[in-house]
Amino acid sequence: MRFFLWTLLLVFPLCGQRTLEYDRSVVSQVRIDLRELGYPPEDVIPSGECAIRSLAVAPNGTIYGATSGKRSHLFALFPQHGYVQPLGFLKDVSLVHRALAVSKSGDVYIGAGGSNGHLFKYVPKRDEAKAIRIDAPLEVTDLGAPVAGEGIHSLAIDRERDVLYGLTWPSGQVFSYRIGSVEFVAHGKVAERNIPGENFEKHKNVGKAITVHSSGFALMSGENGRIFRVKALGTGVLEPLDLNAPTVRGREPYNGVDAWAESESGILYGGTSDGYLFRLDPKSWKIENLGKPLNQYRIRGLAFAKNGKLYGVGGDDDEMARLFSYDPASGVYEMLGMIDVNRRPYYSWQAYVIDAVAAGLDGTLYFGQSERKSKLYLYHP
């Protein structure tokens, strides 16, 4: 018996340690950490309900996130406190996909996916002082459904003009909503035909992300990776531009823009489902293909840091999420490794799928894991 105990003591510490070779393939451990979605051990959004697909930053710096799964929860991270505060679950909602936005007044807008695609408004009220109640419903105002029977696929906000833009699924209808109004405005569809392929492929190519440029245009992708543009307070006409998201020739029907980011100079950067990064100048309306930063499909999120570099996460659902950076000044990519936090013996976790990226006001980058049991990752460039 004593020999058996000594064997356990000798073997298990060795099994729990990582090799130096492995540590060279992950993000530097002095620059990354994670947060549980709540206050362990009990006040945590449960497994199967915690996949993070949406993150948004409020004007005061609060980080909001929405989860998907059996139920959809809203949570907040207040940087001055440092931990995640679950705020409640949305009744009859199981999916929030890239559909979270915060207005200049601090109100949170949430777009439900699935066939119950309503837009909800949540008004924060000293949430940091409230007790965590995982099973409490979130108190929201139901603003209605942009398109009956369809889900809200993605959402973005023009804070300066108080306008929300969204895309529905599966028809790919672009809509807008003026904050304070009582109705949605339909602007047209980004796709008319299903993508070509096998008989089971009966969906349209609808982009997974919307961005609102500082000039007031909303942009998104659609059929054949075509870029579309609309300005709700202008003509309101959805314009198909003579621009397509970069891809391998012949894969246009399957390719779209999964992520957007705008630089301080107003240049837009996009990441495609085929894994390409591109640059779009809104003055000339020309696209420059910047190549593939990773040998993987999908750039799932992009955000600029205060050091001027663009950071992105790539990888499909069956791949390992990897972080990269791109320096617009030099045109140089840097491969930063897999999203992994090692604080053994206290905690350790590695993300396979990241589906949301946001840049905090203090320069911290936030990555939302989208798996059965998920964490919120913090990266310090």
Image (cartoon, rainbow, N blue to C red):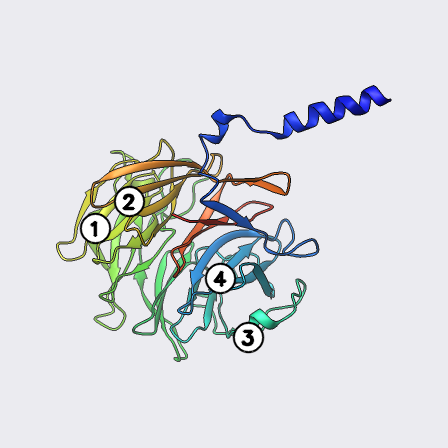
| Distance in Å between CA atoms under marks 4 and 1 | 32 Å
Q: Helix or strand or loop: what does disc 2 sit on?
A: helix
Mark 2 and mark 4: Cα distance apart in space: 41 Å
Q: Is residue 232 above or below residue 37?
A: below
Per the image, label 1 sits on a secondary structure element best described as strand
Question: Which comes sooner in the sequence, label 4 or label 1?
Answer: 4
Q: Give the residue number, with chain letter if any, for mark 4.
A: 79
Q: Which residue in the structure is indicated by mark 3?
A: 126
User: Disc 3 on helix, strand or loop?
Assistant: loop
Check residue 280 in the rendering and tell me which mark sits there, or answer none.
1
Residue 3 is at least partly visible in this image: yes
Give the Cα distance between marks 3 and 4. 14 Å
**Image vertical order of residue 31 relative to residue 86, above or below:** above
Residue depicted at x 55% and y 45%: 371
Dot placed on the residue nearer the N-terminal end, 3 or 4 = 4
Residue 172: % across, % down: 37, 56
Dot 2 corresponds to which residue?
Answer: 224
Q: Residue furthest left?
A: 284
